[in-house]
């Protein structure tokens, strides 16, 4: 595995890449969910490129940018085992040599909904870095987790609207045996919070089986008063208005102590 820290090292490694190139973009603190993305990439592509970069642009002041886990040695060991060919591990100075970029990708009105409503500027930051990493890595195919369902939708929209020659693949969420969706932020949770956090997956699963999913999901959150619900919504699979029947998506976000968690599930409405 080649570890590229600079743009020049990445360019050399990328020039030597053979066949179809897949990229998996991460902020590090890799877990089994990321390993699943890497496995999917390994199964499809000839060259697998992993990026590890904690992107300051997508953190608002007061969010967890400083304390976000940085575990690059362990991440590279996981990457090596997963058969990654090239790992790109830039610093903010390498990614943003002129400082914070004045020009950013505008996510459009959908970028102000759900995560964008609670985290203003979040999708501007995500799409800007994803776009830059697309330019630097020039992949044929890119893998993103369905855990960040709205992010996946926004990236698909950017690829479509900017005519980027990249296939975007979503990979189902990986969960702990008790249902908790894997997230790098789970490591912030104290044991009691970890237990309380199960309400997210429990509410989604109960709601998905009911005839009134939003009411049932919100009611389930009431059983866990320590957890502060941000939103629990039903949309269509493309994040459009809630369908009356057929395929839909339930999405939720909640604060468990000082940790904000998100989760979602597919639903088939009778
Ligand atoms: O999902 C993430 O880890 C990040 O938002 C991403 C896509 C790597 C951009 O920084």
Image: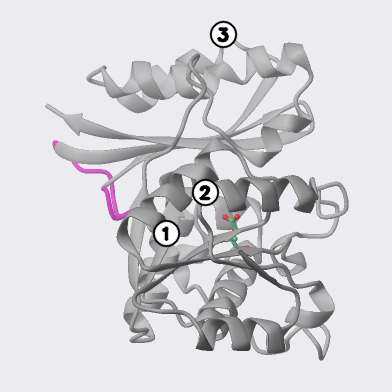
For label 2, the SS is loop
How many C-alpha atoms fall within 10 Å of the one at disc 3: few (<14), some, or many (≥20)? Answer: few
The residue indicated by pointer 2 is: 82
For label 3, the SS is loop
Q: Is mark 1 within 8 Å of ligand 1?
A: no
Residue 244 shows in this picture: no
**Of 166 and 137, which appears nearest the observer?**
137
For label 1, the SS is strand
Q: Based on the displayed image, in which of its 4 quarters is residue 20 positioned?
A: bottom left
Query: From what the image shows, is residue 237 above or below residue 7?
Result: above
Mark toward the start of the polypeptide (3 vs 2): 2
Mark toward the start of the polypeptide (2 vs 1): 2
Query: From what the image shows, is residue 26 above or below residue 146?
Result: below
The reply to whether callout 2 and callout 1 are in contact (CB within 8 Å) is no
For the point 63% across and 50% down, the residue is 118
**Quick one: which residue is furthest to the top in this view?**
223
Query: From what the image shows, is residue 232 above or below residue 90?
Result: above
How many C-alpha atoms fall within 10 Å of the one at disc 1: few (<14), some, or many (≥20)? Answer: many
For the point 52% across and 30% down, the residue is 181
Query: From what the image shows, is residue 239 above or below residue 159?
Result: above
- Look at the image and give the residue range highlighted in magenta: 237-245
Whole-angstrom CA distance, mark 2 to mark 1, is 14 Å
Whole-angstrom CA distance, mark 3 to mark 2, is 40 Å
The residue indicated by pointer 1 is: 143
Image quadrant holding the N terminus, namely bottom right
Q: Nearer the viewer, mark 3 or mark 1?
A: 1
Image quadrant holding the C terminus, namely top left
User: Measured from the top left, where is residue 157 in percent x and y?
Assistant: 37, 71
> Which label belongs to residue 223?
3
In the image, is 179 to the left or to the right of 270?
A: right
């Amino acid at each position: 595995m080649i570890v590229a820290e600079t743009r020049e090292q990445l360019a050399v490694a990328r020039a030597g890449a053979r066949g179809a190139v897949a990229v998996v973009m991460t902020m590090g603190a890799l877990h089994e969910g990321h390993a699943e993305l890497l496995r999917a990439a390994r199964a499809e592509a000839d060259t697998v490129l992993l990026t590890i970069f904690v992107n300051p642009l997508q953190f608002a002041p007061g969010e967890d940018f400083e304390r976000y886990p940085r575990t690059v040695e362990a991440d590279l060991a996981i990457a090596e085992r997963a058969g990654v060919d090239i790992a790109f591990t830039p610093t903010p100075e390498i990614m943003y040599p002129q400082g914070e970029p004045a020009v950013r990708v505008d996510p459009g009105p959908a970028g102000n909904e759900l995560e964008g409503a609670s985290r203003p500027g979040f999708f501007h930051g995500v799409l800007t870095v994803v776009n830059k990493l697309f330019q630097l890595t020039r992949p044929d195919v890119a893998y993103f987790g369905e855990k960040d369902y709205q992010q996946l939708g926004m990236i698909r929209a950017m690829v479509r609207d900017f005519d980027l020659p990249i296939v975007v693949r979503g990979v189902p969420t990986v969960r702990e045996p008790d249902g908790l969706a894997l997230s790098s932020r789970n490591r912030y949770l104290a044991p009691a919070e970890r237990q309380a956090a199960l309400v997210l997956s429990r509410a989604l699963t109960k709601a998905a089986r009911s005839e009134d999913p939003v009411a049932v999901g919100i009611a389930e959150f009431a059983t866990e008063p320590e957890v502060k619900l941000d939103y629990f919504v039903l949309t269509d699979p493309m994040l459009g208005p809630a369908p009356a029947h057929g395929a839909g998506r339930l999405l939720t976000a909640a604060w468990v102590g000082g940790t904000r968690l998100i989760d979602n599930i597919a639903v088939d409405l009778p």
